Image (cartoon, helix red, strand yellow):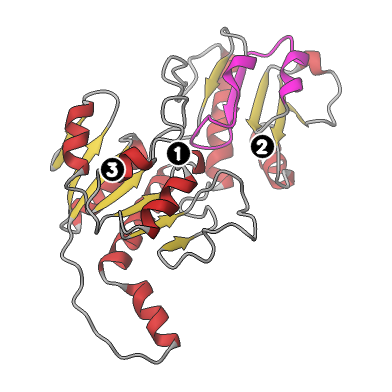
Amino acid sequence: MHVLVAISGRDCSKIIATLTAKLPNVTISQWPDCENLTDVEFVIAWLAPADMWAQLPNLKAVSSFGAGVDSIDMNLIPENVAVTRIVDENLADDMAEYVLTHILAHKLRLKEYFIKQQNQLWQPKRAFKHQHVVILGFGELGQRCAQRLVANHFSVSAFSQSPKNIADVNCIHKQNDLDNVLAQADYLVCLLPLTAQTKGVINRDLLVQLPAHAVLINVARGQHVVAEDLLWALDNQVIRAATLDVFEHEPLVSDHPFWQHPAITITPHCAALSDVDSVTQQIADNVLRLQAGDKLNNKVDRTKGY
C-alpha cells in the first residue's frame, strides 16, 4: 500500500512521522516529492493541486485532512474512488465550547467592557436577556453545540437538509420554517457544510430577516458569508454584531475592513483545531480497512457533498 500526503500550507513532518509509526508496513510519500505515482492507492488531501489527480491511475480512496471536504474538488476524482472525512470527538467538544463562550460574551457585553476599560469608563449595564440560538447545519458539530447550549439554558432551533429529532431542540428542515425562526433568532450560528448551494448563504436577503439585536457567529467556512452584505448589515444596524472564525482567504489580509470594525470579533480559525494523533489514527484505520477490503469509515455522500 502506498499513501500520498498532499496537504498545502503546512509542515507535514509530524503528520508523516505519526502515520509512519501507525502504519509501519505502508509506504508514505509527500507531494510533490513522490516516486512511483502509479503505486499510490490512498491520498490524504487538503487543497491538493488540481493537476495531481490525473497522475494517480490506481487511486482507490481519498481522505480529507479535516472535518469538511470542501478543500477537495470532487469533479477531479473518479466516481469509483471513495472519499472520506474526519470525525473528531474532541473537535465537536471544542466547537461547542467556542460557540457557547462567544454567545455568552455577546450576551454579557464583554467586548463593550473591554473597550470601556481602555477609556477608564465605569458604565455597568444589565446583560442581554436574549436566549434563542438558531443553528444552521445540524451534523455532529451542530448537535454537540446544541447540547451544550441547552445545558446552559438556551433555547435552540436547528436547521438541516433532512428531518432530525433531537431532544430539547426545535429541529426544522423546511425553508418556510427557517424563515420563521430567523425572525426570532437572538444568535445565528453557521455550521453548514460548504457546497454550491450554501456558498454565500449569509447574505443581505438572510440578514434582513434577523432582529436588529441578533448576532452572527460563523464557524463553518468563510465562503458562507458575503462580506459586503455583512458589513452593510452591521453599519446599518440591521444586526448587532458578528463573531467570525473563518474567512474566504486565510490569513485575513491586513487591510480587510473586518479587522477594525467595532461590531466584529475575529479569531484566527481556531474554534476547533484537529488533533494530529486523533486525525492520523482515523486515517490509519481507513488505510488498513482499504488493505483488507473492508468498508471505509466516514464516507462522503457525493450527492450531498459531505
Q: Splitting the image into 4 quarters, where does residue 224 fall?
A: top left
Q: Position of residue 70 (x, y in %)?
A: 54, 30
**Callout 2 amino acid:** Leu
Question: Badge 3 is on which residue?
Answer: 135
Q: Which residues are magenta?
A: 50-76
- Residue pictured at 49% horizontal, 60% vertical: 266
Give the distance between the C-alpha atoms of the residues marked 1 and 2, in whole angstroms: 33 Å
Compared with residue 142, is residue 285 higher up or lower down, i.e. above or below? above
- Residue pictured at 63% horizontal, 53% vertical: 251
**Callout 1 amino acid:** His
Q: Secondary structure at mark 3?
A: strand
Is residue 249 rendered to the left or right of residue 51? Answer: left
- Residue pictured at 30% horizontal, 45% vertical: 144
- Quarter of the rendering occupied by the N terminus: top right
Q: Position of residue 197 (x, y in %)?
A: 42, 25
* Precedes in sequence: disc 2 or disc 3: 2
